[in-house]
Amino acid sequence: MEEGYKIKVNHIGFLTQDMEVSIEYFMKLGGILLNRVLDETWDVELALVKINHFVIELVKPTSNSSPVFKLSRRGPSFYHVCFEVDDIKRSIDLFTMMGFIIVDHPKPAKLFQNRLVAFLYSKGTGLIELLEEERKDENSDCE
């Protein structure tokens, strides 16, 4: 990666066919439900659960046109890692130079307050999600 490039793990994606059962399971493990939304862009129901410092995104397809519908038929499983990046366009360029292919171009993600997300794939790592970090208001420190 380039010098000065910022990347950190944000969450792990968990695919489920039953959101209630999955939330209950992770809550029994000490999880705290952070957020839950219906995202029509991808035809999915989403929830974020935090266990200690670890965040899990629960993903349930809401229709057979959802991009994760076929994969969900295999049963519940962890299926992607999300990296938070400072510049999503630059990150996509860097990852494609490393051999990743773009599965889904950047789109606003309802679960993350409409921050941009993109999905990429490589045979060596499988599916990854890139999440653009929150932009700090440059005027927020001004008096």
Image: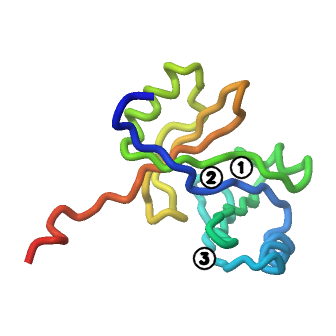
**Please, what secondary structure does the residue beneath circle 2 have?**
loop
Name the residue rendered at 37%, 59% in the picture. 134
Label 2 CA crowd tier, 10 Å (few <14, some 14–19, many 20+): some
The residue where tag 2 is placed is: 42
Amino acid at circle 2: Trp
Which of the two labelled residues, at mark 2 and mark 1, occupies the earlier sequence position?
2
Q: Secondary structure at mark 1?
A: loop
The amino acid type, in three-letter code, at marker 3 is Leu
Q: At 47% from the left edge and 44% from the top edge, which residue is drawn?
A: 7
Residue 88 is left or right of residue 109, and the answer is left
> Which is more N-terminal, label 1 or label 3?
3
Which quarter of the figure is the N terminus placed in?
top left
| Residue sitting at the far right | 74
Residue appearing at x 34%, y 37% in the figure: 4
Where disc 3 sits, the SS reads: strand
Please state if 80 lies on the left or on the right of 27 as rendered.
left
Quick check: 44 above or below 80?
below
Residue bearing the label numbered 3: 34
Which residue is rendered at x = 69% and y = 72% of the image?
51
- The residue that disc 1 covers is 66
